[in-house]
Amino acid sequence: MKAILLALLLFAPLQAREMIARVTYYWGDTITSTGAKPICGKTIAVDPKIIPYGSKVVIPQMGKSFKAVDTGSSVVARTAAKKLGRHDAIVVDVFCSSRAVAMQKIRKYPLFMKIKVEK
């Protein structure tokens, strides 16, 4: 299943791709896996095999766009989606300035949202 999803995403046309993602949130004083300092409302962690670093990730339901500059083992493993039985969804992790900001977003937005990926 994972290989099929990966193949479909990798060989999709280069224009904007849409997919369903389990959107999670993280915070803390950290440096991203690409060496950048994360910015609240701008930084998103992705599986770089599915969404290349530097890609623009738009989440229309949030009315925001992010830059893919980070990753994490739970994002790559799609843990948050699988725990909820959604083996078809990827996981993206939005950086927030604090736990309080993350909790506001968790209450405001649905767990799964459509995202658009642009290069």
Image (cartoon, rainbow, N blue to C red):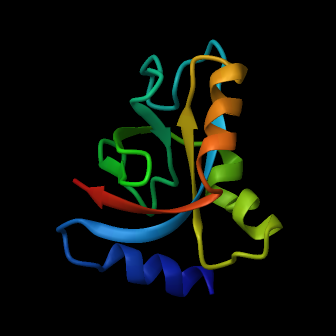
Residue at the far front in the pictured view: 108
Residue shown at 28% from the left, 79% from the top: 12
Q: Residue at x 69, y 48 (%)?
A: 73
Q: Position of residue 64 (x, y in %)?
A: 35, 41
Asked if 84 appears above or below 73 in the picture, the reply is below
Q: Which residue is drawn at 43% across and 54% down?
A: 61
Q: How many marks?
A: 0
Name the residue furthest left: 15
Q: Position of residue 109 (x, y in %)?
A: 59, 49
Q: Of all residues shown, which one is farthest toward the top?
A: 29
Front residue (pair 60, 95): 60
> Where does residue 35 sit, x and y in percent of width and height?
45, 22
Against 119, is 72 above or below?
above
Residue at 78%, 76% (x, y): give it. 85
User: Which residue reaches farthest right?
Assistant: 83
Q: In which quarter of the image is the N terminus?
A: bottom right
Q: Taking 10 as reference, is 76 left or right?
A: right
- Relative image position of residue 79 (x, y in whole percent): 75, 59
Is 79 in front, or is 113? 113
Query: Where on the picture, by quarter, is residue 95?
Result: top right
